[in-house]
Image (spheres, rainbow, N blue to C red):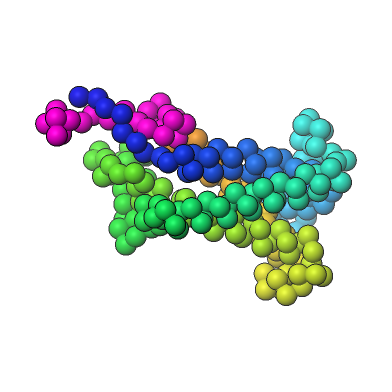
């Protein structure tokens, strides 16, 4: 028998849906800033295998010559990103939701099972629970990445005022690389996350929108 089962509290859904557009806009405004000094590439010496990003990319999406505008938006959105993340961490701590989110001793083993199952190399599905091992690791990593983005962002925004932080992160250039790598990490997380949502189906997506999912419940449990 099918029954509505509560899955995600309102607060978790609020933090999730607010964070998604804010982070996306921060990445977009970050590209306006990166245009002014786009030095990163994959290669060696004078040989470039891949460049982040070609001039044609900036022109196609009208991202060039917007350094001041990008900095204004980026630092404004930084406060929203920080406050939303802080409130999320505080909520999970005081509500006890952290028990479902933090990885435990079985998470890494279970994450391997999830990966093999998603790749079609393992027929047996991992145990069904609110968050599986792979999700626990990924969601915890994103929180740490958010903290890393905040610290590296401050280090490259105010390298003199936050000199101690900049030095702790390895210097200005190192902090800028770390900030860039974290941004790539967010994009990869977005791609994998959206793919997993599509694979999981409408019921899983609805649970993050409405807070409940439709689950099969034995008739004897419904009578109880």
- Quadrant where the image shows the C terminus: top left
Image coords of residue 170 (percent x, y) = 69, 71
Horizontal side of 11 relative to 68 (left or right) equals left
Residue 65, percent from left and from top = 88, 40
Q: Position of residue 212 (x, y in %)?
A: 37, 32
Q: Main secondary structure of the magenta part?
A: helix
For the record, the magenta segment spans 198-224
Farthest left residue?
A: 220
Q: Nearer the viewer, residue 213 or 186?
A: 213
Give the quadrant of residue 3: top left
Q: Nearer the viewer, residue 187 or 10?
A: 10
Name above or below for residue 149 compared with residue 9: below
Residue at figure coordinates x 78%, y 53% from the top left: 39
Q: Is residue 103 left or right of residue 163?
A: left
Q: Is residue 122 visible?
A: no
Residue at screen point 54% across, 43% down: 15
**In the rendered image, is residue 222 in sight?**
yes
Is 190 on the left-hand or right-hand side of 3? right
Residue drawn at point x = 31 percent, y = 33 percent? 5
Question: Quick check: is 88 in the magenta stretch?
Answer: no
**Residue depicted at x 81% and y 47%:** 72
Q: Residue 122: name its quadrant.
A: top left
Q: Per the image, is 223 magenta?
A: yes
The quadrant of the rendering that contains the N terminus is top left
């Amino acid at each position: 028998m099918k029954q509505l089962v509560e899955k995600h509290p309102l607060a978790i859904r609020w933090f999730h849906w607010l964070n998604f557009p804010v982070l996306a806009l921060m990445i977009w405004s970050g590209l306006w800033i990166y245009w002014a000094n786009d030095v990163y590439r994959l290669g060696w010496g004078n040989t470039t295998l891949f460049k982040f990003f070609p001039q044609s990319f900036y022109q196609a999406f009208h991202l060039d010559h917007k350094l001041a505008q990008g900095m204004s938006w980026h630092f404004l959105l930084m406060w929203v990103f920080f406050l939303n993340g802080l409130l999320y961490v505080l909520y999970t701590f005081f509500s006890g939701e952290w028990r479902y989110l933090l990885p435990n001793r079985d998470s890494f083993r279970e994450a391997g099972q999830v990966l093999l199952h998603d790749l079609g190399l393992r027929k047996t599905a991992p145990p069904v629970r609110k968050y599986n091992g792979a999700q626990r690791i990924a969601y915890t990593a994103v929180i740490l990445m958010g903290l890393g983005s905040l610290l590296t962002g401050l280090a490259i925004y105010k390298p003199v005022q936050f000199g101690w932080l900049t030095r702790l992160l390895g210097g200005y250039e190192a902090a800028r690389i770390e900030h860039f790598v974290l941004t790539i990490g967010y994009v990869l997380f977005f791609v994998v996350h959206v793919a997993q949502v599509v694979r999981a189906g409408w019921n899983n997506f609805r649970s993050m929108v409405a807070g409940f999912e439709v689950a099969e419940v034995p008739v004897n449990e419904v009578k109880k």
